[in-house]
């Protein structure tokens, strides 16, 4: 009798173990829908390389004793390909259909909140009209707060910190700087620029009501070549700080014009580290250009090793930390759900906590916004303490302040409908 | 534009062609299964209407417009706003009638902006349409209530009461709606070319001064044609809004206007069915070609360049010239030459494409090593072998092509002479 | 005060850059009736070629060599491509240059990549040409070169001290544009070649029957127009940013300049480009909208009107589309352009 019990117990245990490893070796296909040509092409290509690089590292079971090959608890294999959407929402919908036709259930996107909003809508509609063929949308960089507020969706998960979180941290940093008295807001005239302006004003009014917002300007996206008139205007107001969500040429030309026209104030930005901007910035703005982000170039530990390996292999810089968190979260979610079915995995990922390169992060259940620490970094010459230099410029982004999860967290108004 | 070819069908022929067209539209989705293919077919239908409406201006009216996307785009925006009104019940309109809303909007905007646009033809017209296009596109970010800012406006086409069980949820239902509209619109635009207004429009294109002498006001003719073209453009936009359920500012952008121009011209602006070919190519190029090769825009630009130089009538004119030869029973003599030309040209092009692919690969600093899979062969972008190989292929192909071309022009010339003689002979009978 | 002076100079320099570009376009249009859609692409090629050449022999030789290379490319294009479509009329000519712009865009990205290039101006041009120091007590002062840091920070409280440097690159841009304008005018009116060109403008057949090689003249003119665009490219690329989208951003504005100034009129192009440059620069400075205007006039607006984005639109937000607005208005009210002589 006792023997029979033992046999049953062992069999049961073996079954459990095999069930846990049922996903072992299973292939999870992911498609990244992002621009691979055009204005943001270099960014998209660079980020796709990052995804392919880390797909290898996070596939399969963890290799004990080798932190460079972390694998995932379910032992699945990640396969990722990219489809070019040319930064167009319409193309992205075509790409989504192509991906679904290939049997892909996980879709990643990041560059462009316009595309993100279109994708969320399309994914919602598809999942509603095609039960059994659901798709999950993992957002790695689109920061429009609406995606986790008014337009929140059960099928959408955001891994970047949204504008409200970044502004909370940035505002907190600015509040501590006593020499900041007059702030000028300069942005690109679309949802992102508008949201940045809205949130920084709200945060500063709360934390430092004595700071004056002396001006606010929204210029057309990627059209202005000559920022000298804007710099002249900023100088005329006597602003000592400029807050800007600008990216790409809009940011590099802004700082260039500031330098040429003798504006010596500080710049608080989002996207100093994105492909192309370090080269255009060069030594301009050393010590004056700040960036708020969830990672920087000198995180230390395993991250540094990976960045060096990436640089050697591709001669390119890795800065999209969300990539790592997507793999970690997906792997943990699949293991918890014991299945790769998106409906179960989505339910499993809600509220999930994983430990990653900058501590513990949590996928908040209420709105699917990843709660994570943020860093304020400053553009300066690379030295021994912070040696990593993007695009061989000799400069780097050095961290000056860290904002843990509970500080950078912001409330949400999401009323999520769950299936 | 030089001589305009006239295809004189018999009445039976006309019924046959339109019947085949309708049959094709109805049956082609059964040949394909994936949802991507269905959406490509839907987009082709939309593009056909847009390009035909553009050709109303370019081919029939001689008005080169750089801002046609304004009218398709604004039609899209009005349609999506109407769709949202239908969804929340304030507009009691069936979803099938939505493209008509787009059409009326396109017509309205064309009437509004067209009066000053059509005052002059030629270069001035081109410039003012370009200016309008840039203006509307730039304003799209300034009026977020109408244009929805960067995220655009989205809607849900499953709205209102289902009609005979048709909800427009599944893409195939949308395809059949688009096919219906396409057929009707194409027939309507063809009928337009047969009306007196359509004929006067051609006259305005060819000799505006004489038209004035005959007693017509050229500006009024152009303006009316502009409004009608705007109507069909708006229908195309409305169908687009229904198909994608989202409209963003790029639908009024210069890129789209440029694409209409490029592909309508490529298809053939001098024939009625030319833009249909152009529209099909446009959708295929944008959706599929960009997946095959990164250099697709380069290839497109080069094809366009050579088309303008050697075949300004577009693909349609090439087809028609050969059809004329076939009508005289002489095509058989040419097919060997055509084959030779095609093979040698393909050879040269493959070599060139191989080189272009390798350069692109080097540019992108290939993460997958230095090799590129090209047509089943592995090319090494850093290996001298591959470069020499490609250069050799190009030179051989080009050399042989030149030889074949000379032979071909001789044969072509002879055949054209024979045809002229035959025509004279028939005229004397 | 210094804000006004600096803004005026900024506007003038931008306008003169536009003029350098549109002068080539006007020349080509006057001579050949071809509206060259690829003109902005030649500007881009000039910047990229200038970058490469200056990397090899330095900036100053590149300033001469790059425009020559671009001019040669333009002449070759005219000889082998454009000439073939002359017989089809003006529309195919326009279309072929349109196709060329796509091809150049892709080729440039193929050869030089898709990221912005770091095209730095030479050391002589880095830093300010002069600095205006506005002291609230002592008034305005001009200092050649850069002002040292002590002079820019106010020592006493209650004194506002603003240093406004004017970049040397901008000053150089203005200088080159003016020199270029002068030499082109001299060439056209005082030399034999210029007289032939002027004659070929209105009576090409007569000129040909007089024995001048008109196709050669056309090729030279197209090449010269492209070379001017290339020169503008070297200067623009080093002052602003050298990237693949630089043709698209400046392309539409030069057409506006040519049309507003009057097709075929060089002085019209000059006037229009300076006007557009100055107005666009100054418009950025003003935050007035229709709403504020109504407020100043004492009109009471309801909450809907106050929230309406059209009414809230400020002049500074509208600044980048002002050129297109001008274009449309000019074509409505005065299609000949400001100083144009020919109607099309």
Image (cartoon, rainbow, N blue to C red):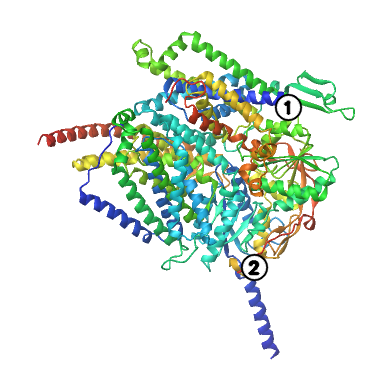
Is residue C15 rendered to the left or right of residue C217? right
Instruction: Give the foreground label among 1 and 2.
Output: 1
Q: On the rendered image, what quadrant is the C terminus of chain B found in?
A: top left
Q: On the rendered image, what quadrant is the N terminus of chain B found in?
A: top left
Q: Is residue B399 visible?
A: no
Up-down relation of residue B215 to residue A45 (above or below): above
Subunit under mark 1: C
Most foreground residue, C290 or B167: C290
Taking the view exactly as shown, the residue that stands out farthest to the right is C156
Q: Residues within 10 Å of mark 2 (few under 14, many from 20)?
A: some
Most foreground residue, A72 or C271: C271
Q: Residue at x 79, y 47 (%)?
A: A204
Up-down relation of residue B256 to residue B428 (above or below): below
The reply to the same-chain question for discs 1 and 2 is no
Percent coordinates x, y for residue A234 in the rendering? 74, 34
Q: Tag 2's secondary structure?
A: helix
- Displayed quadrant of residue B311: top left
Q: Tag 1's secondary structure?
A: helix
Is residue C137 rendered to the left or right of residue B314? right
The answer for how far apart the CA atoms under marks 1 and 2 are is 59 Å
Subunit under mark 2: A
Percent coordinates x, y for residue B157 in the rendering? 49, 60
Pointer 1 residue: C3
Taking the view exactly as shown, the residue that stands out farthest to the bottom is A1
Most foreground residue, A37 or B292: A37
Q: Residues within 10 Å of mark 1 (few under 14, many from 20)?
A: some
- Displayed quadrant of residue A414: bottom right
Disc 1 and disc 2 in contact, CB within 8 angstroms: no
Pointer 2 residue: A347
């Amino acid at each position: 009798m006792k023997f029979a019990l033992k046999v049953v117990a062992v069999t049961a245990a073996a079954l459990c173990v095999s069930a846990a490893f049922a996903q072992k070796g299973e292939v999870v296909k992911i498609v990244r829908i992002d621009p691979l040509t055009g204005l943001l092409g270099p960014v998209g290509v660079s980020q796709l390389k990052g995804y392919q690089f880390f797909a290898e590292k996070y596939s399969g079971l963890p290799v004990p004793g080798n932190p460079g090959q972390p694998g995932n608890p379910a032992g699945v294999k990640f396969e990722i390909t990219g489809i070019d959407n040319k930064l167009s929402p319409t193309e992205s919908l075509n790409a989504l259909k192509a991906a679904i036709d290939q049997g892909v259930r996980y879709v990643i996107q990041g560059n462009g909140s316009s595309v993100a909003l279109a994708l969320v809508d399309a994914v919602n509609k598809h999942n509603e009209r095609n039960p059994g063929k659901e798709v999950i949308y993992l957002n790695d960089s689109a920061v429009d707060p609406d995606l986790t507020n008014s337009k929140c969706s059960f099928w959408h998960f955001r891994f970047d910190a949204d504008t409200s979180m970044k502004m909370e941290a940035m505002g907190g940093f600015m509040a501590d700087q006593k020499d900041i008295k007059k702030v000028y807001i300069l942005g690109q005239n679309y949802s992102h620029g508008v949201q940045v302006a809205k949130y920084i004003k709200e945060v500063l009014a709360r934390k430092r009501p004595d700071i004056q917002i002396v001006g606010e300007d929204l210029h057309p996206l990627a059209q202005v070549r000559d920022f000298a008139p804007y710099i002249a205007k900023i100088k005329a107001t006597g602003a000592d700080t400029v807050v800007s969500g600008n990216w790409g040429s809009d940011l590099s030309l802004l700082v260039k014009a500031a330098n040429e026209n003798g504006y010596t104030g500080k710049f608080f930005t989002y996207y100093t580290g994105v492909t192309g901007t370090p080269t255009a910035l060069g030594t301009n703005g050393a010590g004056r250009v700040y960036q708020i982000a969830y990672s920087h170039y000198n995180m230390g530990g395993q991250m540094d090793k990976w960045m060096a390996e990436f640089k050697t292999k591709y001669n390119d810089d890795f800065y999209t930390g969300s990539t790592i968190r997507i793999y970690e979260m997906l792997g943990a979610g699949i293991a918890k759900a014991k299945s790769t079915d998106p409906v179960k995995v989505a339910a499993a990922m809600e509220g999930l906590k994983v430990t990653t390169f900058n501590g513990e992060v949590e996928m908040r259940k209420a709105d699917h916004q990843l709660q994570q620490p943020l860093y304020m970094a400053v553009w300066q010459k690379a030295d021994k303490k912070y040696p990593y230099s993007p695009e061989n410029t000799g400069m780097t982004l050095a961290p000056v302040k860290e904002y843990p999860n509970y500080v950078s967290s912001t409330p949400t108004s999401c009323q999520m409908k769950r299936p | 534009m030089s001589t305009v070819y006239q295809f004189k069908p018999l009445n039976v022929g006309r019924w046959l062609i339109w019947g085949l067209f309708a049959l094709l539209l109805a049956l082609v989705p059964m040949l394909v299964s994936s949802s991507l293919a269905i959406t490509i077919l839907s987009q082709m239908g939309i593009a056909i209407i847009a390009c035909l409406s553009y050709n109303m201006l370019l081919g029939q009216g001689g008005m080169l417009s750089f801002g046609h996307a304004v009218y398709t785009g604004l039609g899209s925006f009005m349609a999506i706003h109407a769709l949202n009104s239908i969804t929340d019940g304030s507009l009691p309109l069936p979803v099938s009638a939505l493209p008509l809303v787009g059409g009326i909007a396109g017509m309205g905007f064309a009437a509004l902006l067209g009066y000053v646009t059509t005052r002059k033809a030629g270069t001035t017209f081109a410039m003012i349409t370009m200016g309008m296009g840039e203006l509307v596109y730039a304003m799209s970010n300034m009026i977020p209530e109408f244009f929805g800012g960067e995220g655009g406006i989205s809607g849900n086409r499953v709205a209102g009461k289902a009609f005979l069980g048709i909800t427009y949820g599944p893409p195939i239902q949308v395809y059949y709606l688009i096919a219906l509209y396409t057929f009707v619109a194409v027939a309507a635009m063809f009928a337009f070319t047969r009306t007196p207004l359509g004929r006067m429009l051609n006259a305005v294109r060819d000799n505006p001064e004489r038209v004035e002498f005959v007693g017509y006001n050229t500006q009024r003719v152009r303006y009316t044609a502009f409004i009608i073209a705007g109507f069909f453009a708006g229908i195309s936009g409305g169908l687009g809004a229904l198909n994608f359920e989202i409209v963003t500012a790029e639908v009024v952008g210069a890129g789209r206007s440029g694409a209409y121009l490029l592909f309508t011209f490529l298809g053939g602006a001098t024939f009625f069915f030319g833009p249909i070919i152009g529209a099909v190519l446009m959708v295929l190029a944008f959706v599929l070609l960009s997946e095959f090769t990164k250099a697709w825009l380069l290839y497109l630009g080069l094809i366009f360049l050579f088309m303008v130089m050697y075949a300004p009538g577009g693909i349609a004119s090439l087809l028609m010239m050969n059809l004329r030869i076939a009508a005289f029973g002489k095509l058989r003599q040419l097919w060997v030459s055509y084959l030779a030309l095609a093979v040698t040209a393909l050879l040269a092009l493959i070599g060139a494409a191989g080189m272009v692919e390798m350069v692109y690969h080097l540019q992108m600093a290939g993460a997958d090593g230095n090799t590129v899979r090209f047509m089943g062969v592995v090319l090494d972008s850093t290996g001298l072998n591959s470069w020499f190989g490609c250069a050799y292929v190009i030179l051989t192909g080009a050399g042989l092509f030149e030889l074949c071309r000379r032979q071909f022009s001789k044969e072509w010339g002879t055949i054209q002479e024979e045809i002229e003689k035959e025509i004279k002979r028939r005229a004397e009978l | 005060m210094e804000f006004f002076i600096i803004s005026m100079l900024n506007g003038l320099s931008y306008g003169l850059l536009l003029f350098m570009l549109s002068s080539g376009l006007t020349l080509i249009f006057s001579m050949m009736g071809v509206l060259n859609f690829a003109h902005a692409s030649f500007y881009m090629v000039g910047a990229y070629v200038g970058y490469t050449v200056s990397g090899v022999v330095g900036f100053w030789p590149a300033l001469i060599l790059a425009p020559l290379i671009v001019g040669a490319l333009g002449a070759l294009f005219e000889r082998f491509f454009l000439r073939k479509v002359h017989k089809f009329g003006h529309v195919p000519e326009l279309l072929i240059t349109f196709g060329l712009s796509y091809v150049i865009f892709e080729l440039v990205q193929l050869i030089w990549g898709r990221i912005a290039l770091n095209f730095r101006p030479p050391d002589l041009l880095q830093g300010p040409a002069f600095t205006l120091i506005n002291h609230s007590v002592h008034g305005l002062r001009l200092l050649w070169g850069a002002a040292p840091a002590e002079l820019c920070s106010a020592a006493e409280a209650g004194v506002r001290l603003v240093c406004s440097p004017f970049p040397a690159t901008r000053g150089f841009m203005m200088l080159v544009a003016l020199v270029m304008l002068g030499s082109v005018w001299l060439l056209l009116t005082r030399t034999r070649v210029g007289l032939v060109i002027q004659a070929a403008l209105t009576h090409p057949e007569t000129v040909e029957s007089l024995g001048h090689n008109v196709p050669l003249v056309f090729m030279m003119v197209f090449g010269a127009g492209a070379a001017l665009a290339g020169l503008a490219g070297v200067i623009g690329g080093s002052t602003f940013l050298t990237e693949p989208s630089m043709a698209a951003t400046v392309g539409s504005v030069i057409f506006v300049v040519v049309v507003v100034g009057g097709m075929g009129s060089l002085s019209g192009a000059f006037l229009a480009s300076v006007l557009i440059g100055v107005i666009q620069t100054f418009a950025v400075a003003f935050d007035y909208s229709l709403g504020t205007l109504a407020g100043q006039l004492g009109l009471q607006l309801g909450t809907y009107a106050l929230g309406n984005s059209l009414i809230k639109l400020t002049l500074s937000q509208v600044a980048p589309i002002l050129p297109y607005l001008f274009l449309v208005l000019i074509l409505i009210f005065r299609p000949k352009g400001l100083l144009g002589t020919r109607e099309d």
